[in-house]
Image (spheres, rainbow, N blue to C red):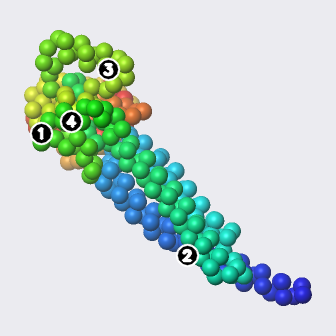
């Protein structure tokens, strides 16, 4: 009796490992598709760094790619009747897809939707930040919650002191001005304002002398000269970066992980 047990165990483990390996392969293919969706569409550079996209995605994928194949390793057993085995595996796949779906939904609602010039800085706005009750006030020609990565916008000047006061009070209470559709306007309208607010890159290099070489390297990689660019600070979810732009056109040339506030 012992010999048959000993003969069966290795092949049973071989089956389990093979099943788990196939499952891992399929999970990795799905993870690659999810990565394309998240980093190709929703969180292009630099948002995967500044909007927390990478951390969120890694949690989702770790759960998915590790958990599914591990459960398969545990439940896969050729000795079980086929109907029972099929039911077990179907449950594993359903649990895994539900976890992936929930994870991707979390990443989706937290995705960046706009990079907004907010009077003297840039701010990243995420889908979850935009008040639902203001969505109807989105100006014509602007997509409130774009599906394929953030768009550039700016904020219009306040109509009067009352509006300015109300907005300031709301901002103090934690409502970001940039997340308000009723204040949005096309980016190009604010080019003159951006030109006025942006400071020369030489100032930035003087302020952060120890990072001057890094700043030059980022600009050189874009084929530009430092003296042709200006900078503005950038506020994101938990970090502060710096935007380098062409003051003549307002075009954003590069992003640097440098808090220039």
In percent of the image, x 45 and y 69: which residue is there? 29
Q: Which of marks 3 and 4 is nearer the N terminus?
A: 4
Mark 4 vs mark 1: in front: 4
Viewer-proximal residue among 78 and 18: 78
Viewer-proximal residue among 162 and 202: 162
Mark 2 vs mark 1: in front: 1
| Residue 98 badge | none
Question: How many marks can you see?
Answer: 4
**What is the secondary structure assignment of the residue under circle 1?**
loop
Distance from Cα at disc 3 to Cα at disc 1: 24 Å
Q: Mark 2 points at which residue?
A: 22
Tell me if residue 83 comes above or below residue 196 in the rendering.
below
Distance from Cα at disc 2 to Cα at disc 3: 52 Å
Q: Which of marks 4 and 2 is nearer the N terminus?
A: 2
Q: Earlier in the sequence, mark 2 or mark 3?
A: 2
**What is the secondary structure assignment of the residue under circle 3?**
helix
**What is the secondary structure assignment of the residue under circle 2?**
helix
Position of residue 101 measured from the top left corner of the image (x, y, whole percent): 45, 56
Distance from Cα at disc 4 to Cα at disc 1: 10 Å
Crowd band around label 4 with a 10 angstrom C-alpha radius: few (<14), some (14–19), many (20+): few
Viewer-proximal residue among 88 and 198: 88
Work out which residue is located at the far right of the displayed protein and give it.
Answer: 1
Q: Which of marks 2 and 1 is nearer the N terminus?
A: 2
Q: Name the residue under label 4.
A: 136
| Residue 140 badge | 1
Viewer-proximal residue among 251 and 102: 102
Q: Quadrant of the N terminus?
A: bottom right
Mark 3 vs mark 4: in front: 4
**What is the secondary structure assignment of the residue under circle 4?**
helix
Q: Mark 3 points at which residue?
A: 171
Tell me if residue 172 comes above or below residue 135 in the rendering.
above
């Amino acid at each position: 009796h012992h010999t048959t047990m000993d003969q069966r165990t290795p092949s049973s483990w071989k089956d389990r490992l093979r099943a788990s390996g196939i499952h891992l392969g399929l999970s990795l293919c799905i993870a690659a598709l999810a990565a394309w969706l998240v980093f190709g569409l929703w969180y292009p550079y630099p948002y995967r760094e500044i909007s927390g996209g990478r951390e969120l995605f890694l949690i989702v994928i770790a759960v998915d790619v590790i958990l599914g194949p591990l459960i398969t390793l545990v439940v896969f057993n050729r000795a079980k009747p086929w109907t029972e085995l099929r039911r077990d595996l179907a449950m594993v796949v359903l649990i895994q897809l539900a976890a992936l779906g929930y994870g991707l939904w979390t990443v989706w609602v937290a995705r960046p939707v706009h990079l907004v010039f907010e009077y003297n800085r840039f701010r990243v706005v995420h889908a979850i930040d935009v008040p639902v009750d203001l969505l109807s006030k989105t100006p014509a020609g602007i997509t409130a919650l774009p599906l394929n990565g953030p768009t550039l916008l700016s904020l219009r000047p306040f109509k009067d002191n009352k509006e300015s006061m109300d907005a300031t009070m709301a901002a103090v209470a934690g409502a970001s001005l940039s997340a308000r559709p009723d204040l949005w306007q096309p980016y190009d309208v604010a080019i003159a304002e951006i030109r006025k607010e942006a400071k020369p890159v030489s100032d930035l290099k003087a302020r952060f002398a120890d990072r001057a070489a890094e700043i030059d390297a980022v600009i050189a990689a874009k084929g530009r000269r430092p003296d042709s660019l200006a900078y503005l600070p950038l506020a994101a979810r938990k970090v502060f970066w710096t935007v380098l732009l062409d003051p003549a056109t307002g075009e954003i040339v590069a992003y640097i992980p440098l808090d220039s506030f």
